[in-house]
Amino acid sequence: MKIESKRFRVRSGKKVVLSKWPTTIEPVCPSAAEYDDLLKKHVAELSSLQQLHYASHRYALLLIFQGMDSAGKDGPSGT
């Protein structure tokens, strides 16, 4: 199963109206166990890509998190 990321991309020069964007998607996995397996696989893949990115010393990456209910002092802050 794959999330269609094109639904969430913003083209250069376009204005974003967040109230018009969907906040939910169809479930990726039919069960919690399958979700856990998929999450472990993706974490391993992301870790591998992160090591490759770090070793290249060529590019930078900026991640922006939007916090709603879970935003607060214990969330990702970079400090």
Image: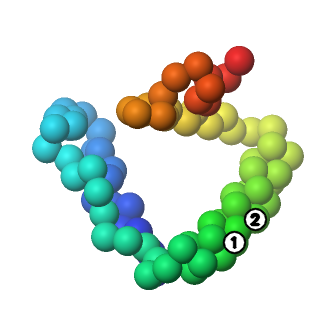
Relative vertical location of residue 6 with respect to residue 71 in this rendering, above or below: below
Q: CA distance from mark 2 to mark 1?
A: 5 Å
Amino acid found under the numbered disc labelled 2: Ala
Query: Residue placed at 39% from the left, 32% from the top?
Result: 68
- Could you say where residue 70 lies in the image, as x and y percent from the top left? 48, 34
- Could you say where residue 61 lies in the image, as x and y percent from the top left? 62, 37
- Find residue 51 and name its label: none
Name the one closer to the observer, 63 or 28: 28
Q: Are marks 2 and 1 in contact (CB under 8 Å)?
A: yes
Name the one closer to the observer, 54 or 67: 67
Q: Is residue 7 left or right of residue 3?
A: left
Local packing at callout 1 (Cα closer than 10 Å; few below 14, some 14-19, many 20+) is few
Figure colour scheme: rainbow
Q: Is residue 20 left or right of residue 65?
A: left
Residue receiving disc 2:
44
Query: Residue placed at 21% from the left, 37% from the top?
Result: 18
Query: Residue placed at 33% from the left, 50% from the top?
Result: 9
Residue receiving disc 1:
41
Q: Quadrant of the C terminus?
A: top right
